[in-house]
């Protein structure tokens, strides 16, 4: 998750603005946006039956793997592969006295799409009692080790699907319906909305007047509240400018919160340079959300070797 960072002062009466870019799904090392058609919408993880584990340990490995992938914002479930679903095959191989976990992402047609080795463990730890019961801590550690790399493969699969789709955001600008600004004092609603409409469009993103045609919908709400007086005893106000972006399904894709203090009622009339400065920062942050949420800048995973 991006940390708040100082940016230029919005007006001569304002304190430095703080811009916080809040991505959904919690703090992630690698964002994993909703899957694109022909990419995994969810991932089933059957308990393995060919790795020498007792049923309870096999089921626990699958459950730990699902939980670890959920921590990477992947819709994973420990269950048998269901019709139409991508699934993760859990296997092992032997090498130099170690058991090497092998994770293979399988298509709904049960063909391999990509594979990833995990960190090896000593053979003596895999079947310490000869009955295939492995320590839960080892299974959990294996899952936590593999999850980020499996998530990276899934990101590449999604990017490859987008690359092949001429209508995906890898091949055209994102269309954003901006519903405007509410709650701003003075002429802020009109000034801030106009400034954003001027600042946002570029070769990667555009605005549309038709909500039904939009890939994303953006709204902005301004909240004003009393703040403690400054050191000279002058009255101040908090100004919170909150931008929220939703995808075409209504799912929240991300938010931008701009916070600063102003002299009381300083923006009850014209906003001056405050509107374009605020809009410029918000537009840049909105583009970043779209980049990360859509996955359009991710590198496609090459097709499997023949």
Image (cartoon, rainbow, N blue to C red):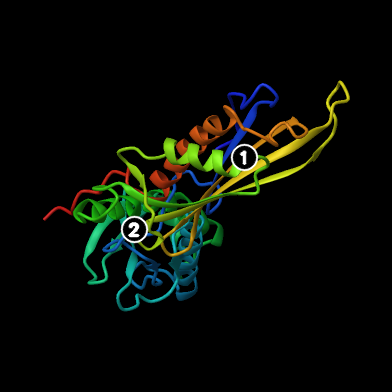
Residue 184, image x and y in percent? 65, 44
Residue 153, image x and y in percent? 32, 51
Distance from label 1 to label 2 (Cα)?
57 Å
Front position in the image: 210 or 111: 210
Residue 71 in view (yes/no): yes
Q: Is residue 89 left or right of residue 11?
A: left
- Image quarter (top left, top right, bottom left or bottom right) of the N terminus: top right
Q: Is residue 268 left or right of residue 117?
A: right
Give the label on residue 103, or none. 2
Quadrant of the image occupied by residue 81: bottom left
Q: Earlier in the sequence, mark 1 or mark 2?
A: 2
Q: Are marks 1 and 2 in contact (CB under 8 Å)?
A: no
Secondary structure at numbered mark 2: strand
Q: Is residue 6 left or right of residue 213?
A: right
Front position in the image: 127 or 14: 14
Label 1, on which residue?
187
Q: Residue at x 52, y 31 (%)?
A: 276
Quadrant of the image occupied by residue 189: top right
Residue 229, image x and y in percent? 85, 30
Q: Residue at x 39, y 68 (%)?
A: 45
The residue positioned farthest toward the right in the image shown: 233
How many marks the image carries: the answer is 2
Residue 124, image x and y in percent? 44, 56
- Image quarter (top left, top right, bottom left or bottom right) of the C terminus: bottom left
Q: Residue at x 20, y 54 (%)?
A: 166
Secondary structure at numbered mark 1: loop
């Amino acid at each position: 998750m991006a940390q708040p960072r100082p940016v230029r002062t919005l007006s001569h009466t304002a304190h430095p603005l703080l811009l916080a870019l809040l991505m959904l799904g919690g703090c992630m090392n690698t964002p994993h946006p909703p899957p694109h058609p022909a990419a995994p919408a969810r991932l089933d993880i059957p308990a393995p039956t060919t790795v020498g584990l007792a049923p309870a340990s096999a089921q626990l490995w699958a459950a730990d793997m699902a939980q670890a992938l959920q921590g990477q914002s992947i819709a994973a479930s420990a269950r048998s592969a269901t019709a139409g679903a991508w699934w993760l095959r859990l296997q092992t191989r032997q090498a130099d006295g170690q058991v090497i976990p092998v994770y293979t992402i399988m298509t709904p047609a049960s063909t391999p799409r990509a594979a990833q080795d995990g960190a090896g463990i000593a053979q003596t730890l895999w079947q310490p009692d000869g009955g295939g019961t492995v320590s839960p801590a080892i299974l959990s550690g294996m899952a936590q080790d593999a999850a980020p790399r499996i998530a990276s493969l899934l990101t590449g699969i999604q990017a490859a699907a987008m690359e092949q789709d001429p209508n995906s955001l890898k091949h055209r600008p994102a269309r954003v319906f901006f519903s405007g600004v509410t709650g701003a004092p003075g002429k802020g609603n009109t000034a801030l909305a106009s400034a954003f409409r001027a600042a946002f469009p570029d070769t990667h993103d555009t605005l549309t007047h038709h909500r039904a045609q939009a890939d994303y919908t953006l709204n902005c709400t301004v909240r004003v509240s009393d703040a403690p007086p400054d050191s000279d005893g002058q009255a101040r106000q908090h100004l919170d400018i909150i931008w929220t972006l939703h995808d075409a399904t209504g799912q929240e894709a991300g938010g931008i919160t701009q916070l600063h203090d102003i002299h009381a009622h300083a923006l009850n009339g014209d906003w001056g340079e405050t509107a374009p400065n605020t809009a410029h920062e918000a537009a840049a942050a909105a583009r970043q959300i779209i980049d990360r949420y859509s996955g359009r800048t991710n590198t496609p995973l090459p097709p499997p070797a023949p």
